[in-house]
Image: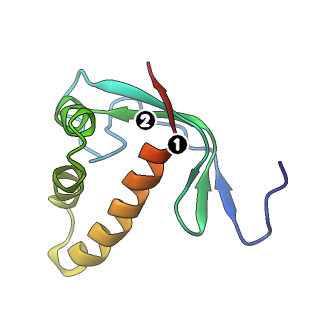
């Protein structure tokens, strides 16, 4: 597949002990979600596995996207929280659309 010049393609190496959805490291074990290519506007992530901590996995499995976004935003600077929520909602939606399985 040819990638357009205006798209940034990333291959992200997970830290292994942080949730890819809320960035916390204190709620393991969790669940891994296999995903195809994830497109979030200007950034495209290569196919990979997105790791979810226990609380985020429960929200994902229950399709509670707003609670997932709010959990991700809790630790962010209040001054940029609204902008972060807008972007994280888009990212979470893109991940869910690209899911290929649960590992």
Q: Nearer the viewer, mark 1 or mark 2?
A: 1
Q: Which residue is mark 1?
A: 98
Asked whether, in this view, residue 103 is left or right of residue 71, the answer is right
Crowding around mark 2 (Cα neighbors within 10 Å: few <14, some 14 to 19, many 20+) is few
- Residue 54 vs residue 95, the one in the foreground: 95
> In the image, residue 41 lies at what x, y percent?
55, 68
- Marks 1 and 2: CB-CB under 8 Å? no
The secondary structure type at the circle numbered 2 is loop
The disc at residue 59 is none
73 sits to left or right of 15: left
Q: Which mark sits nearer the N-terminus, 1 or 2? A: 2
Asked which colour scheme the image uses, the reply is rainbow
Residue at position x 39%, y 26% from top?
32
Residue, disc 2: 15
What residue is at 33 percent from the left and 61 percent from the top?
Answer: 89
- Outermost residue on the bottom side: it is 79
Q: Tell me where residue 9 sits by quadrant.
A: bottom right
Quadrant of the image containing the C terminus: top left
- Does residue 89 appear to the left or right of 14 in the view shown? left
Q: Residue at x 15, y 75 (%)?
A: 78
Q: Nearer the viewer, residue 91 or 80?
A: 91
Cα–Cα gap, marks 1 and 2: 21 Å
Tag 1 secondary structure: helix
Residue 31 in which image quadrant:
top left
* 64 shown above or below 82: above
Where residue 94 appears, as percent x and y from the top left, is 47, 53
Residue 101 screen position, x and y as percent: 48, 25
| Circle 1 crowding by C-alpha within 10 Å: few under 14, some 14–19, many from 20 | some
| x then y, percent, for residue 59 | 20, 39
Counting the numbered discs, the total is: 2
């Amino acid at each position: 597949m040819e990638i357009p010049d205006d798209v940034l393609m990333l291959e992200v190496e997970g830290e292994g002990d942080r949730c890819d959805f809320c960035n916390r490291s204190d709620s393991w074990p969790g669940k891994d979600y296999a995903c195809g290519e994830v497109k979030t506007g200007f950034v495209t992530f290569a196919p990979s596995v997105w790791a979810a901590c226990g609380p985020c996995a429960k929200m994902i499995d229950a399709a509670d996207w707003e609670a997932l976004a709010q959990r991700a935003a809790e630790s962010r600077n209040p001054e940029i929280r609204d902008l972060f929520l807008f972007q994280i909602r888009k990212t979470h939606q893109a991940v869910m659309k690209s899911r290929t399985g649960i590992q």
